[in-house]
Amino acid sequence: MKIFIRSSACVSAQKTFGNVGFLTDITEYQGTRLRTIEPDYKEFIDPKQIRRMSHVIKMGVAAAKECLNNGDVEMPGAVITGTAFGCMEDTVTFLTRIVEQEEELLPPTAFIQSTHNTVAAQIALMLKCHAYNNTFVHKGISFESALFDALMMLKEQDADNILVGGTEEMVDTSYTVLTRLGLYRRQPVSNLSLYDSTEKGTIGGEGAAFFLLTDKSSSENMAELTGLRTFYRPKDANDVSGRIKAFLVEHNMTTDDIDLVITGKNGDYRNDNIYKELQSTLFKNNTTGNFKHLCGEYPVAASFGLWLAANIIKKGNIPPVILEKDNHAVSAKIILLVNHYQNKYFSLMLVSAV
Amino acid sequence: MDQTIYVAGVGVISGIGNNVAEHLASFEREAAGMADITLFETIHQHSRPVAEVKLTDDELIAQTGLSTHNGRTALLSLVAAREAMTDADIPDIKNWRTGFVSANTVGGMDKSEDFFVHFLADNSKGKLKNVFDHECGSMTEIVADELGISDFMTTISTACSSSANAIFYGARLIKNDILDVVIAGGADAITKFTLNGFNTLMILDKELCKPFDENREGLNLGEGAGYVVLISEKVAQKLGKRPYCKLSGYNNSNDAFHQTASSPDGTGSYLAMKKALKKSGLNATDIDYINLHGTGTPNNDSAEGTAIKRLFHPAYPPMSSTKSFTGHTLGASGGVEAVFSVLAVKHGLIYPNLRFKTRMTDLPFEPETKFQKGQKIKHVMSNSFGFGGNCTSLIFSEVKE
């Protein structure tokens, strides 16, 4: 069975949402944290509700609704989301009040909206959608887990037009804690020169990207999601390489068939070494691109990667800003997305023209 | 894709026992697990009874052999998941594709709470190791590593229906030929965060909860973990014993009514039960026992009761809420109660709904109040409903000789 991406929508640190050019007007940031460019939420959410909603809920709901609009679908057959940290803003708010107010006179709203399934639930609520509704929260493969569920569901012929998304918000507290944990650069850096030096630390990010998946072919579809695979703690680069080759063989391909490899390079050498090794071996003849200098690093950043891949195929052009130095290509019909989160959770996505 | 999914093993820990045998004994003695809070300092210490697991973190560490403490939820999870795997005793398990699908709602929140007190006073303070495994997924990862499972793992979090969805998902992974064996369920420890959260919603009973009673006043929080080992037909053939039962039906539907409240007519729960029946090919009259979600809150029991009335009237099977023993174990409840449902099929058990006195005015039925064994139980329905309108029903059915 072939699975297609019918439509997508993405809120990110770049101008990716709504009626805008495809990464034609790139936003440069100086720092170690990229914040999303906000849509006009009033177009998607009742203004009374906007005030009560945290950032991740607003981003998620807006991206989900825009994705449905783009796919011309009113009611999805299922709603599945992925997020590693969930609703951090409300979680931090409620935790802070427990400590500061010593458990007295706490308002319930932050707790109510702190559960990890809040985004998927709010989508169901707004659409009055009674269908299957699930939320995956598995660290660096939270989004891929949601996507995997959708693929199985289409194969089971249990639903069509499945709405799948990855959402993550970065709040001051998580940024401070993750900085202390050594995830980000110690000095401000331009996101557009993120890969220029060999250093520890990346830049933090956030975002929401949604996709409508269907098994019905149509010339309107953006792309085919040909394959998805995740794996855990590979032994070494050879192991990773072997798994990628095996994944391609399952789809009757070799690296020669791949027009563009998009990697999850993030400017931290501890993260990027594996990609560099693959680029000099397995992918030595492939055109390569990266995306985390555009959106920052976050556990569901692969959802931005998939949005990028689907759009490259649909729009028939590769934005030059994603290409690795000295790599040239104007378009791609088959794209392999290789991502990992902190060398533990790897994912492979194969996206091709319909 | 239409293959049968069998349950080969079960494991559970909660306020009424640290393993399956202790649970069965507590049910038979009709002994609930609720008492004053001892796990942490709180202003609710003596006013909100909870069902704590009767082991301290140190005792759990000693029992599990985990070298670090990264969250009580991981400790509880490891105890129950390991019991389930040992119980299943699958020959040559290394030769099968094995996965771990676990659920929880607040990950390593108990440790994050410790961190946060220091962090709030000074952002450069607080031990980082206490917040390193804050994520829900970390709990799953810690346990999968201990169990030696690396083929597949993921974590689900849909509030109080979380681990029912994990079991449902595990079954689908086998049906889709991704895996042969899945340890599925969930865990949640009581934390200050959840205790205060539920308290702000004013749905915690100051006394021991009374699910499905006209005069019910709310829920008691509980904690624990529950896992089932799901296996494919191929694995079942090599098992060398009869599986407990099969997972014959499941459905996840959304109430789409309110972020926390259930709709008055129980739309989500009605759809979940009805579609789970359809999936299993059974009729409502085939169900021999319902393990209710039955939290004891006015809203849940009324909505769930109404949904049951719509689906089962006029022939009501025996039903009860085991939360009257374990309290509401939140993200663990679907797994914990799946274990009880599996045991009900295997041993012909009906669990009592403790402290029930008065039938709800709008409902023409009431829950069972006596522990019964040796009953003819072919099909058991287990309900798990949660915040966000997430409603899931599972059906476990006997395996014929």
Image: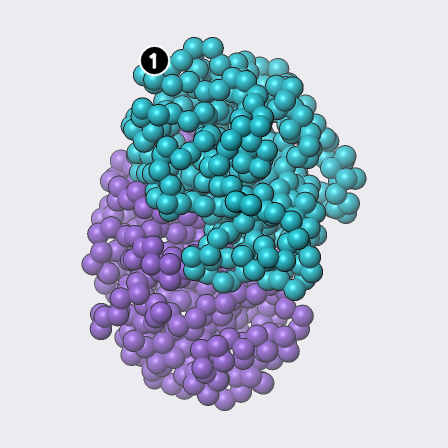
Chain colours: A purple, B cyan
Indicate whether B392 appears above or below B234: above
- Work out whether residue B347 or residue A56 is closer to the camera in this orientation and state it: B347
Give the left or right position of residue A213, taking residue B104 as reference: left
State the residue position of label 1. B361
What's the residue at 48%, 84% (across, down)? A255
Query: SS for tag 1?
Result: loop
Give the left or right position of residue B84, taking residue B401 as reference: right
What's the residue at 77%, 39% (across, down)? B63
- Number of numbered discs present? 1
Residue B167, position as x, y percentages in the image = 51, 46
Indicate whether B208 appears above or below A96: above
Residue A162, position as x, y percentages in the image = 32, 56
- Work out whether residue A101 or residue A304 is closer to the camera in this orientation and state it: A304
Indicate whether B283 appears above or below A285: above
- Work out whether residue A334 or residue B216 is closer to the camera in this orientation and state it: B216
What's the residue at 46%, 56% (across, down)? B3
List the single residue furthest toward the front.
B401
Give the left or right position of residue B54, taking residue B285 as reference: right
